[in-house]
Image: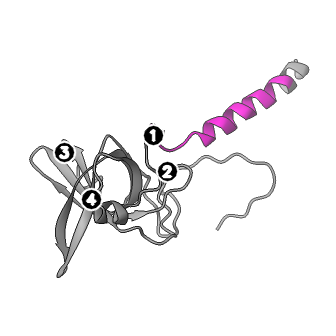
Amino acid sequence: MRRTAMKTLPIIAAMLVLTACATGPQFDTDGVNRDLQPRQAAADQVRDEQVIWGGTILSVKPQQDTTQIEVLAYPLDRGDQPRIDRSSQGRFLIIADGYLEPADYGEGRQITVRGPLEEARTATIGEAEYTYAVVHAEDLHLWPRRTSHGTRSEPRVNFGIGIGIMR
């Protein structure tokens, strides 16, 4: 009995580790231009290019059949999560089909989108005119809220061996 437990314990541990690593979105990356940034796309009036962009939500405006989300763009990490500790890459708009609840997609939330670029739009920020790159959302991922300490506020499960110090 003890020998069987010793054989299955590493298998169970490996399964838990692999499951813990499988977080975040799994976007289809076929045909995605990862080099194109929002500021460049708006300036060059790029259309129909597939992109995966993310950042911090600045505003959400439900419209007749769509929802418009204004985003301050940041580079993405390997898991496609915005790196808000880096310099911003400009602003862009997400156009999502249907109604998205502004309370859920609120200001300050992190978001990642995949989709094709549409025609750029011009609007004003304060008294300055700004040209936005526009992404038609095919896939959206809203990241968990963060606390004031920069950590996720949702419960997390951690496995480890040794001594840990928590603040």
**Residue sitting farthest toward the bottom:** 127
**Which residue in the protein does label 2 denote?**
80
- Earlier in the chain: of badge 3 and badge 1, it is 1
Q: Quick check: marks 4 and 3 in contact, CB under 8 Å? A: no
Which is more foreground, mark 1 or mark 4?
A: 4
Which is more foreground, mark 4 or mark 3?
A: 4
Q: Pointer 4: residues within 10 angstroms few (<14), some, or many (20+)?
A: some
Q: Pointer 1: residues within 10 angstroms few (<14), some, or many (20+)?
A: some
Q: Secondary structure at mark 2?
A: loop
Q: CA distance from mark 3 to mark 2?
A: 24 Å
Left/right of residue 9 with respect to residue 100 in the rendered view: right
Q: Quick check: marks 2 and 1 in contact, CB under 8 Å? A: yes
The magenta region covers 7-28
Q: Quick check: marks 3 and 1 in contact, CB under 8 Å? A: no
Q: CA distance from mark 4 to mark 3?
A: 27 Å
Q: Confirm whether the magenta stretch covers residue 96.
A: no
Q: Which mark is residue 27?
A: 1
